[in-house]
Amino acid sequence: MTRTITSTCPPLSIESRSDWLAGALRVDQIRTDTLVQLVAGWGDEDTRDDVIAALDALAAVVTGIRREGELDAAVEEIEDVASMDTAQIEIRQADAARLHTELGLVAERLSRFGQMRGVA
């Protein structure tokens, strides 16, 4: 499904899917930070072999038959050996207000056939 881009800042936005059945939170900065931190760990000679081993283990999990919790454990191992930070960003007041408005629009679209599930 395609998304209708309505945000004034698509790299940090909340948008509806074109059929209005789901929404999407987009935070490009988290992906950028994740890749930079991973490559920094990979580029450090003291941790390079551990990062490569952890990536190989993740590849095996992704391409094989997964047991419950195995994917999370493999991802956490990479985060640990590459000394990666928590996947979060700080937002300014203006971004918070814009995201609040965007989320309100998405919530309104998702609930167009009645009250949203789980909302009292």
Image (spheres, rainbow, N blue to C red):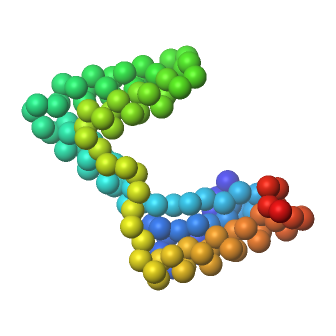
Between residues 80 and 61, which one lies in front from this camera angle? 80
Residue 45: x and y in percent read 9, 32
Where in the figure is residue 69, as x and y percent of width and height? 53, 26
Is residue 32 in view? yes
Residue 102 pos. (x, y %): 62, 74
**Direction from residue 59 to residue 10 in the image, left or right:** right
53 shown above or below 119: above
How many numbered badges does the structure rendering display?
A: 0
Q: Residue at x 18, y 25 (%)?
A: 49
Give the side of residue 94 with respect to residue 108, left or right.
Answer: left
Query: What residue is shown at x 77% (from left), y 71% (from top)?
Result: 108
Q: Which image quadrant for residue 74?
A: top left
Residue 78, percent from left and from top: 33, 33
Q: Quadrant of residue 44?
A: top left
Q: Is residue 81 left or right of residue 113?
A: left
Which image quarter holds the C terminus? bottom right
Image quarter in which the N terminus is found: bottom right
Residue farthest to the left?
A: 45
Closer to us: 74 or 35: 74
Q: Nearer the viewer, residue 75 or 12?
A: 75
Q: Look at the picture and state if 23 lies above or below 47.
A: below
**102 to the left or right of 74:** right
